[in-house]
Image (cartoon, rainbow, N blue to C red):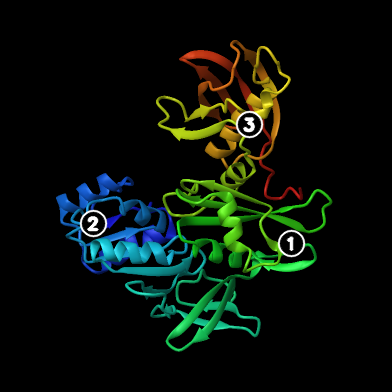
Amino acid sequence: VLSGVPLHHIYGLLFGMLVPLLAGATLVAQAPLHPEAIAASIATHQVTHLVSTPAQLRALELLDPQALKPLVRVFSSGAPLPSAVAEAFHSRFGVGITEVLGSSETGGIAWRNRTDGVPPWETLPGAVVTADEDGRMYVDSPWLAPGSTRPQATADHIRFVDGGFVHLGRLDDVIKVGGRRLALSDIETQLRAIAGVDDAAVLALPTSSGHGHFVIAVVATRVRSSAEIRAALEPHFEPVLLPRRVVCTEVLPREPTGKLIRARLEALALATDDDPVLTPAPAEGADARFLVSVPAASRYFDGHFDDDPVLAGVVLLEAVVLRGCVWAFPDLLRPTAISRVKFRRRVTPGDELVLELRRVDRKIEFEILCADQPCVGGEVVYAPKPDNDDPR
């Protein structure tokens, strides 16, 4: 058994260690993440079972069809498995995928084989799944923590069918847009059904008036434009419910487990075509490192200055430094101060930069380099986390 999921994650612990040990399997000690390294480990150790995530399985599609030949079964969890990924994987490698539904609070709940189509979920042995009149899922199992309310209410919306149940999304993702109710999962489902879309996520952000929300869709695609994505959604939703923005990117910022960190998704969703583009890179001695491309046609250069365009320092601090801090360290709270800032070199249209971050508790030391020469340096200080008994 080879696990590409960290063992500190409940799914990685259960299926990457405990289930294999109970089955008397041999565990591969390494946990490679990149497709070539996974293929090499499978070949070297004659791995028969791979514990993986949807994002990882999508990346493996680039491998030669013979690269995963020893495999007889793949497990997937951590995020919904798109039908296109399951079907493409099975077609290319001839290996079926067992998808697992669970949570940190309950452990494993249900499973289904994704060889062909989208079958209903079947409850795992020992777990009992029920639902109230609103379709809210309740779970009872031997693995609930002592003292838990039994059965435990979840935020999952389900419907029972022959052979199991269908997962309809989350009950807590329903928002109001323009006075109308909208389930964010409905938009995500439609986005993933569009040909050429590899992955999708939807954010609901409060309007400036404080009443209601507006929606931003972030879509992983290499062949579709924002206008095409929006046009494909129009037949399914009223105009007021359509995403206000559609951001297209090559890949969503998922963790190795497949989970999305909201702060990183917001940073990607709120970036504009005028903002510098940040790409994570190997740290090389720093705690985090990004390659930064400055758009030559960015409106930030308009009037600053007409004959000698220079990127304003406030843009570098907000659109580069603070965005990089959010991406690298999503556990931090709000910034309270930016200090010791020194601007040593001008940043001009089309410049290629490097942002390096070094963290000491709540302080982030930053440095921006251009052609290996220092441009900007300083320190960002973030608010402390409140004590558990602090009412704030």
Residue 177 badge: none
- The numbered mark, 2 or 3, whose residue comes first in the sequence reads 2
Q: Nearer the viewer, residue 78 or 215?
A: 215
Q: Decide if residue 33 is on the left or right side of residue 319.
A: left
**Contact check, label 2 and label 3, Cβ < 8 Å:** no
**Which residue lies at the image location 64% right of the left edge and 70% below the top edge?**
171
Residue 313 shows up from this direction: yes
249 w.r.t. 120: above or below: above
Name the amino acid, label 2. Answer: Leu
Name the amino acid, label 1. Answer: Val
Which residue is denoted by mark 2 in the rendering? 27
- The numbered mark, 1 or 2, whose residue comes first in the sequence reads 2
Residue 150 shows up from this direction: no
Query: x and y percent of residue 27 in the render?
Result: 23, 56
74 w.r.t. 36: above or below: below
Quadrant of the rendered image containing residue 159: bottom right
- The numbered mark, 3 or 1, whose residue comes first in the sequence reads 1
Quadrant of the rendered image containing residue 9: bottom left
Query: x and y percent of residue 42 in the render?
Result: 20, 53
Query: x and y percent of residue 286 in the render?
Result: 46, 26
Q: How many marks?
A: 3
Query: x and y percent of residue 213 in the render?
Result: 74, 57
Q: Dot 3 lies on which element?
A: helix
Mark 3 residue crowding within 10 angstroms, few (<14) / some (14–19) / many (20+): some
215 w.r.t. 82: above or below: above
Foreground mark, 1 or 2? 1
Residue 319 badge: 3
Q: How far is mark 3 from mark 1, CA to CA?
A: 29 Å
Q: Dot 2 lies on which element?
A: loop
**Which residue lies at the image location 49% right of the left edge and 65% below the top edge?**
193
Q: Decide if residue 51 is on the left or right side of residue 282.
A: left
Which residue is denoted by mark 1 in the rendering? 240
